[in-house]
Image (cartoon, rainbow, N blue to C red):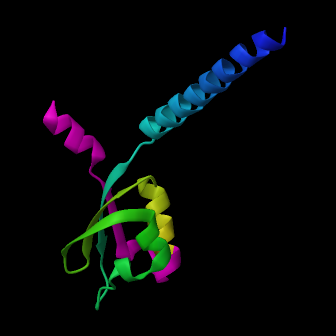
Amino acid sequence: MANVFRILGPILVIGLILLIVKQSKKTEAEIVEYDLIVSIKVEPAPNIIQHAKIKEAATWEVYGKGVFRGKSVLKKDEMKALLKKELCLTEENIIVVDATDSFIKSKT
């Protein structure tokens, strides 16, 4: 009986490890990233990348004066709310466009 556990024990442990690794890869693949374009309509336009919470929310590129493009797990409305809060701006001064759908449609 002890020999059975010596054989099955490592097999079960390896099986469990493989199952956990497979689940973690599946979770990473299910994460949706949004391609967002942000325009700040105030003078002088702040560099949003200098704000820690905003910088952490996306992978940003500067597209021009007050215009940024970022890939984020935040949706358009969530990003707009974050920018509004962190930059202390009104909703009228922030434009966020979700370019994800148009990019996907243009490739098909």
- In the image, is 94 to the left or to the right of 81? left
- Residue 106 drawn above or below residue 83: above
Q: Residue at x 51, y 29 (%)?
A: 22
- Could you tell me residue 104's position as x and y percent? 23, 38
Residue furthest front as drawn: 3
Q: Quadrant of residue 14?
A: top right
Number of numbered discs visible in the structure rendering: 0
- Residue 78 drawn above or below residue 19: below
- Could you tell me residue 57's position as x and y percent? 45, 64
- Could you tell me residue 40's position as x and y percent? 31, 76
Q: Quick check: is 41 in the magenta stretch?
A: no
- Could you tell me residue 5's position as x and y percent? 78, 15
Looking at the picture, tell me which residue is in the foreground, 97 or 17. Answer: 17
Residue furthest bottom as drawn: 44
- In the image, is 63 to the left or to the right of 13? left
Residue furthest left as drawn: 107
Q: Quadrant of residue 30?
A: top left
Looking at the picture, tell me which residue is in the foreground, 106 or 90. Answer: 106
Q: Residue at x 38, y 48 (%)?
A: 33
- Residue 69 drawn above or below residue 35: below
Q: Which residues are magenta?
A: 85-108
| Quarter the N terminus occupies | top right
Q: Quick check: is 88 in the magenta stretch?
A: yes
Q: Residue at x 53, y 33 (%)?
A: 21
| Quarter the C terminus occupies | top left
Q: Residue at x 15, y 38 (%)?
A: 106
- Residue 86 drawn above or below residue 6: below
